[in-house]
Amino acid sequence: MTDIIRQIEQAAREAGDIIRSAHGRELHIENKEGHANFVTMYDKKVQDFLTERLGEILPGAKFLGEENGLDVFRPGDEEGWLFVIDPIDGTTNFIHNMHPYVTSIGLMKDGVPYAGVVYAPVTDQMFSAERGMGAYENGHRIHSSKASLEDSVMLSGSAGFSDTAFEIAQKVTADFRGRCQGVRSTGSAEYNLCMTASGRSGGYYEMRLGLWDYAAGGLILEEAGGRITDYYGRPLPWRGPSGILALSEGTARDTNLPDTGSYMDQWDQVI
Ligand code: IPD
Ligand code: CA
Ligand code: CA
């Protein structure tokens, strides 16, 4: 493990302290665009804290984050260091005091993932990876599962941003459900990716995620032997919103996977 990742992990732990300090306090919840899309004072506070703290680790690095107007991949972001932050992934869970919710920090170098850290403060789980150096949970090497789809549990996201997307997402889930041991929803995209990376789940799919929802966990999954693509199975450009199909080593090899691309076609027809 290099010094950079150790320092990013430490920053994520400190972010976890801020999140834990919210317990029992007023969260100052605001509504953002779309259905049940919330932000609290703590989302903003943690992002501000991380922007400052991570800037000390890599001076000159750029930032992309879900909150505070930093949510767009800008020209020039594909050059040099770029931190991609989701201060609290699983804000709705956080508001309801329901695990999981995590702090997620991706680090890109010249437009491709270089490192990823996902920290779950409630359970004190630290997931991390550096390109080419494997993936870890609390310091122990992790590997995605070799089980087939029919022997796996899958994870999904609700695509709550639009009624039509939600309806199509339900069809994808029905399609997966019949081919595996069940589909679960945790409410945190990055946690789902880490559950797949650590061999607990056979995979995770969601019709649209922001870069901050998958930048860290996507690399952790790849380094754990899994695969992350869009719904058509194409490599991710790692630039912005995308449908995400994340698979373990075993389910990626499975010939009985649903044709997720056909559902994305249905979605494309309505937008
Ligand atoms: C959300 C969570 C959720 C996923 C949504 C994301 P947020 O992130 O990851 O699991 O289904 O698509 O937007 O808003 O809690 O950071
Ligand atoms: Ca998120
Ligand atoms: Ca968030």
Image (tube, rainbow, N blue to C red):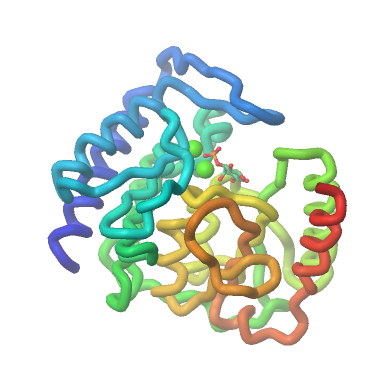
Residue sitting at 46 percent across and 69 percent down? 221
Residue 78 lies, in percent from the top left, at 37, 59
Above or below, comparing residue 70 to residue 244 in the picture: above
The residue lying toward the viewer, choosing from 254 and 159, is 159
- Residue 194 seen anywhere in this rendered image of the structure: no
Would residue 268 appear left or right of 147 to someone viewing this image? right
Residue sitting at 86 percent across and 49 percent down? 270
Residue 216 lies, in percent from the top left, at 41, 57
The mark total stands at 0
The residue lying toward the viewer, choosing from 238 and 164, is 238
- Residue 67 seen anywhere in this rendered image of the structure: yes
The residue lying toward the viewer, choosing from 2 and 19, is 2
Residue 249 lies, in percent from the top left, at 54, 81
Residue 38 lies, in percent from the top left, at 57, 27
Residue sitting at 22 percent across and 59 percent down? 5
Residue sitting at 62 percent across and 30 percent down? 37
The single residue placed furthest to the front in the displayed view is 75
Quadrant assignment for the N terminus: bottom left
Above or below, comparing residue 12 to residue 169 in the picture: above
Would residue 61 appear left or right of 106 to someone viewing this image? left
